[in-house]
Image (cartoon, rainbow, N blue to C red):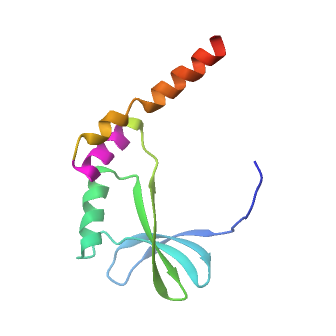
Amino acid sequence: METLKEWNFKLKLVRTRRGAILHVIELSKDHFFIEQNPLKDSKYGYAYRKIKNRFPEFFMFWEIKNNKYTGRLLAGAILEKKEIDEFITDVLHSEEFKKYEDVLEQIENEQEEGETG
């Protein structure tokens, strides 16, 4: 693996004026990502509350650069396969994605056949 770019950053835990405790990923003085406030009475605040209730390891961070929202979002979670399946089902509100579930197993089986065959 070749390193193409490297960042030094701080991970902070902050308290907002309204009392919400949020994570901040600070890349530089004027560039950071702040966690969505789950207490905020907005579309994203409401959605984040619902997601965090079901998936506590999920995080959403809004990018702030030069004191302005960029409109970009960093989101992610460390989940078990079962949890990500539930998450995807909830997000998509359909069972359609399940037809793709066996792709990983199929690829693994093909690799095993290539190694033994």
Question: How many marks can you see?
Answer: 0
Q: Which residue is painted at 26% across and 64% down in the image?
A: 47
Which residues fall within the magenta stretch? Answer: 82-93
Point out the residue furthest to the right here. 2
- For the point 28% across and 71% down, the residue is 45
* Quarter where residue 44 is shown: bottom left
Q: Residue 87, percent across and down?
A: 32, 47
Where residue 97 appears, as percent x and y from the top left, is 31, 41
The quarter of the image holding the C terminus is top right
Q: Give the camera-side residue of 23 and 117.
A: 117
The answer to whether 46 is drawn above or below residue 77 in the figure is below
Q: Is residue 68 above or below residue 85?
A: below
Q: Residue at x 29, y 57 (%)?
A: 51
> Is residue 103 magenta-colored?
no
Where on the picture, by quarter, is residue 82?
top left
Horizontal and vertical percent for residue 115?
Answer: 65, 16
The percent position of residue 104, horizontal first and vertical second, equals: 47, 31
